[in-house]
Amino acid sequence: MRPLGTFLLGMAMALLLRSTLLSGLSARGIVIDALAFTTVLWALRHGDTWGSTFGFAVGLLADIDAAHWLGRHALVLTLIGYAAGRLSGTLVRESARTQFVLIATATLVHQLWISAFEVGAAVTGLPYLLGRTLIATLVTASAGTLMLMGVRRLTGQPLFGNAFRTPSAD
């Protein structure tokens, strides 16, 4: 029951942050992609299956919340969760550089995907959307990496565990 509660709490926090606090920053030109960030975190912690499940669920709820086409966020967040989860077994997950690159890549992919739906056939808004995508990538990756470093310092223990778990001989 505890993993299900954590799963639902993580989705609720990401959606609430996106709908309330971060929408105010977005209106001022600072975009923080909470959906991609939480999907990467969940995938690093729980692997590819749970990462893709989390990405799909949070993406579908985000589509319903924003009255978009269903699946617009769900598809790309599912793929991001799967990719980050697959890489989590081979990467040093506690490395700040690794976390920065994963969060930046996920944010870039997510922002480019949703920007493609916003641009459509008009190319007049393309420079603005590319600038917004670049800002979102840098801000989300920087803020996310700093937050993870702060949490790791406060707790004094690794957040994600070791990438290579060897069975004990006992």
Image (tube, rainbow, N blue to C red):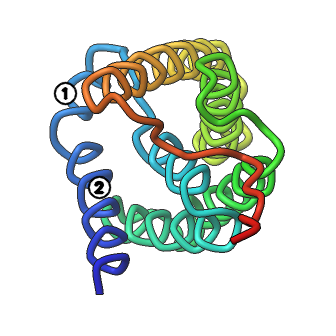
Numbered mark located on residue 124 in the image = none
**Relative to residue 94, is residue 89 depicted above or below?**
below
Residue most toward the right?
90
Q: CA distance from mark 1 to mark 2?
A: 14 Å
Q: Judging from the image, what secondary structure is the residue with disc 2 in?
A: helix
**Identity of the residue drawn at 53% across and 68% down:** 69
Looking at the rendered structure, the number of numbered marks drawn on it comes to 2
Please give the label number shown on residue 15: 2
* Amino acid beneath label 2: Leu
Q: Amino acid at mark 1?
A: Gly
The residue that disc 1 covers is 24
User: Is residue 98 left or right of 90 when viewed as pictured?
Assistant: left
Q: Position of residue 117 (x, y in %)?
A: 63, 48
Residue 112: image quadrant is top right
**Horizontal and vertical percent for residue 160?**
53, 45
Q: Nearer the viewer, residue 122 or 21?
A: 21
The crowd level at tag 1 (other Cα within 10 Å; few <14, some 14-19, many 20+) is few
Residue 121 screen position, x and y as percent: 74, 40
Question: Counting residues from the N terminus, which is met first, the one under dot 1 or under dot 2?
Answer: 2
Q: Foreground residue, 136 or 4?
A: 4
Q: Does residue 33 sit above or below 125 in this rendering?
A: below
